[in-house]
Image (spheres, rainbow, N blue to C red):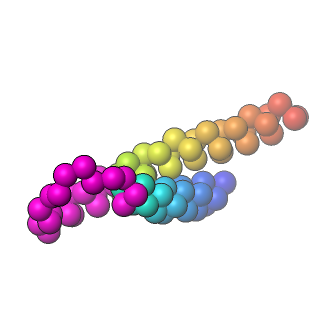
């Protein structure tokens, strides 16, 4: 069960990160900005991955916990 939950969490993290990147690219740019430096780009990418991991952890808890409760209630 631990391997399955880790696989689900890693897969969700990657998918959510892709979704967050897609959302950032589609958001309208209100004002022209200077290109970000390498440190700012790295921080932006790091924040995206941390956000994706947090959302994936919550989703994994809900999914695996829900499956566990269904197993308990089913008997």
Residue 48: name its quadrant.
bottom left
Residue at the right extreme, as displayed: 75
* Residue 52: x %, y % from top left: 42, 52
Whether 36 is among the magenta residues is yes
Residue farthest toward the bottom in the current orientation of the protein? 38
14, above or below 30, in the image: below
Front in this rendered view, residue 68 or 30? 30
- Is 73 above or below relative to 67? above
Please indicate, yes or no, whether residue 37 appears anywhere in the rendered image.
yes
Look at the image and tell me in which quarter the C terminus lies: top right
The foreground one among 64 and 22 is 22
Q: Is residue 25 left or right of residue 9?
A: left
Q: Residue at x 56, y 44 (%)?
A: 59
**Magenta residues?**
25-48
* Location of residue 44 (image quadrant): bottom left
From the viewer's perspective, tell me whether residue 70 is left or right of residue 5: right
Quarter in which the N terminus is drawn: bottom right
């Amino acid at each position: 069960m631990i391997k399955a939950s880790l696989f689900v969490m890693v897969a969700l993290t990657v998918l959510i990160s892709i979704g967050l990147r897609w959302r950032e690219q589609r958001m309208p740019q209100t004002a022209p900005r200077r290109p970000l430096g390498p440190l700012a780009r790295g921080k932006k990418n790091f924040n995206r991955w941390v956000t994706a991991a947090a959302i994936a952890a919550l989703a994994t808890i809900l999914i695996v916990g829900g499956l566990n409760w269904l197993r308990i209630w089913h008997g």
